[in-house]
Image (cartoon, helix red, strand yellow):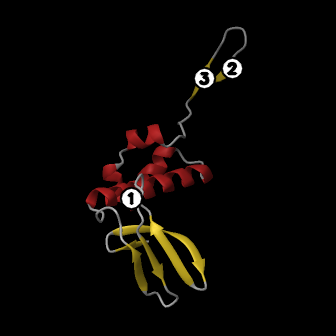
Amino acid sequence: MEHDGFYYKINKTIGGKRYYVCATPNVYCKGTLIQLENGTIIPNKDHTHLAYGPTFNKQQLIKRLRTTLIERSKTETKALKVIYDEESVRNQEAALNYSWPQQSLICGRPEEVFVQHYHPHYGSWANI
């Protein structure tokens, strides 16, 4: 959830009230807010850092694209490059910051290449 330039994650829900804590990565922050049943947002504790700028927004776009790529690669049989190309059309801004060579090294699903290999004695298909 985003509010006033800060990002929050839900901590708990009690009696229709949602309690959120700051979702800043790698920083200890006491920033919290409460969302009432009617949607009203009440800031509770102040943050120990400034609101996010364009750099964090870029990181969030990349994170969403990467998560989508990983989830689709788990459920689809398409080549990872094809999935990346489809998602880069949907998320052009994220794709500009998360190029194909970068994501193919990080994403974790290597492309398999099958090469016919004939051994004079056995004759077989080799998975390289």
x, y (%) of residue 34? 47, 79
Kindly identify which residue carries mark 2.
124
Q: Quadrant of residue 54?
A: bottom left
Depth check: 116 or 36 in front?
Answer: 36
Residue at image coords 42%, 57%:
28
From the viewer's perspective, is residue 23 above or below residue 96?
Answer: below
Depth check: 121 or 33 in front?
Answer: 33
Indicate the secondary structure of the residue bearing disc 3: strand
x, y (%) of residue 87? 43, 56
Indicate the secondary structure of the residue bearing disc 1: helix
From the viewer's perspective, is residue 26 above or below residue 108?
Answer: below
Depth check: 67 or 48 in front?
Answer: 48
x, y (%) of residue 58? 32, 57
**Crowding at mark 2 (Cα within 10 Å: few <14, some 14-19, many 20+):** few
Residue at image coords 32%, 74%:
4
User: Nearer the viewer's eye, disc 1 or disc 3?
Assistant: 1
Residue at the extreme right of the image, as rendered: 122
Measure the alpha-carbon separation of dots 2 and 3: 7 Å
**Crowding at mark 3 (Cα within 10 Å: few <14, some 14-19, many 20+):** few
Kindly identify which residue carries mark 3.
116
Depth check: 106 or 59 in front?
Answer: 59
Q: Quadrant of residue 42?
A: bottom left
x, y (%) of residue 41? 42, 83
CB within 8 Å, label 2 to label 3: no
Residue at the extreme top of the image, as rendered: 121
Mark with earlier residue (1, 3): 1
Measure the alpha-carbon separation of dots 1 and 3: 42 Å
Kindly identify which residue carries mark 1.
60
Residue at image coords 66%, 23%:
125
